[in-house]
Image (tube, rainbow, N blue to C red):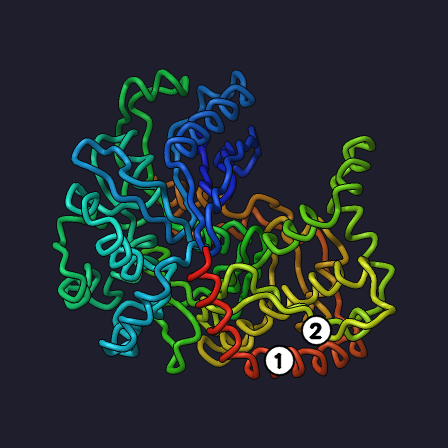
Amino acid sequence: MQAIIGIDIGTTGCRAVIHRTDGTLLANQSVDYPLYTPYPSWVEQDPEEIFQAVIAAIKKAVAQAGPAAHEITGMCFGAAFHSFIPVDKDGNALYRMLNWADHRSQPYTEKLKAEHDAKAIYARTGCPLHPMYMPSKILWFKQEEPALFRRTHKFITIKEYVLHRFLGKYAVDRSLASGSGLYNIHDLCWDRELLAILGIAENMFSTVVPTTHVEQAIAPQIASQLNLPADISIVIGAGDGMLSNVGAGAVNPGQLTAMIGTSGAVRLVTDRPTIDAQGRTWCYNLTDKYWVAGGAINNGGIAFRWLRDKFAETEQRVAEKLGLDAYQILSGYAEKVPVGSGGLILLPFFAGERAPYWNASARGVLFGLNLNHDKRHIIRATLEGITFRMFSIYQALNQVAGPVNEIRVSGSFTRSKLWVQIMADVFGKVINVPGEPEGSAFGAVVLGMHALGILKDVKEVGNFINIKERYYPDDSNHQRYLELYAVYERIYWNLQDEFAAIARMQQAWQ
């Protein structure tokens, strides 16, 4: 029997799981790391802290596997999209990593839109112009940090940073490359027109390889740290969102995944690059045979965390004493409030927004407050507002990638039965919760098994996945949510000038 390690380098933590090739779980470990937000719209992380967390998570998983660790023959890596690290010739980070939520480069996004054909760039790359993507971040770095820019050897992602330490070489999988905003998804190469616009050479980026690319050895010192053989097979893997689809078993036509963790995303697997005439969605690579069309939101669980951290200090202390999760207490409060939160609507744009609006200037709005509202209503309105964001992408994908016949969900929000029921009622669809809770990490295991020839196709993931829960929509709740969603949309579109004005003020005053 063989076993595969699946690694998910997420936004705020790394998870390592070990599964035998029959699907048996041997280990599941995670290690967290912080976000740094020195100014509004700045979201940074320390690449070295993340690297050490990856090492620690794998070591803990190998230790948990115990004697079965000798069965491990390979590991496959997943990582969050849209990280940005400039490194020198020795591989040292020259600046903290900018992650997907960092929007400091918004003025450079507007400059690109004003001076170049944004629709043509989207058509070639599958990525709308937005500050989460590399083009805007590179322009910001080039203009605002010229001395460091001159020292930069390469621009890489966090997975490349980790794998460079493991392998001693730079390589990026086609999945993360296609999520950079710099990769031509039709010609399968770095987009030369964009490189010319940015004034940078192609050799400032890693060699692009398929997600199933295999390396046969890791650095001896890394192997020693991990208590693994140096000749272990390393599958370069894919982006976390793509692997989340695989881990949920949603790899067939019409199967949609909705994930809410720190951020959120709605995705469908397709057999070719699929773009939207209105530019609402993106398209990233999964394997040589499959692509994924979808959209991601900035404000998923991060908005709920904001509510917990800023307004639930008492609940956090109580939860700690009782051995509970504070989110359980907050969800219990929200359950006592009727559908629609008494007409209270939250637009949870705390970190700008991605799909389908692509508006980094959007800001949070609490609308409809009256004297009857209290903390419970705000909590429920937060859960509903985040779900409305997901619903907006679901509507776009229905038009872009074909009709949806099944919805599977993953992410930390599945721990709240209330929140999953809200999604069923907002979408007006049955929501299926797969039995595998660690979607992206397990997806890495499955992709690893495919790359190593154990599975002929990632679609064989269906052999390992069962549906453990189903949530059915309530028609009357769905109709109420559709009415609220219409108001929600009007609020957003009516505030475009105000969003832009307040974003400019915040930028100027930071």
Please report the residue visible at 78 percent of the width from the left and 53 percent of the height from the top: 331
Q: Residue at x 77, y 46 (%)?
A: 328
Between discs 1 and 2, the one toward the N terminus: 2
Residue type at mark 1 is Ile
Q: Nearer the viewer, residue 509 or 62?
A: 509
Whole-Å distance between the Cαs marked 1 and 2? 8 Å
Residue 309 showing in the rendered view: yes
In the drawing, does residue 331 fall left or right of residue 232?
A: right
The residue depicted at 42 percent of the width and 41 percent of the height is 45
- Residue 470 position, x and y percent, is 72, 59
How many residues crowd around disc 2 within 10 Å: few (fewer than 14), some, or many (20 or more)? some
The type of residue carrying mark 2 is: Phe
| Direction from residue 219 to residue 204 in the image, left or right | left
The mark found on residue 367 in the picture is: 2
Identify the residue at image location x=68%, y=49%: 310
Secondary element at image label 1: helix
Mark 1–mark 2 contact, CB under 8 Å?
yes
**Relative to residue 224, is residue 480 depicted above or below?**
below
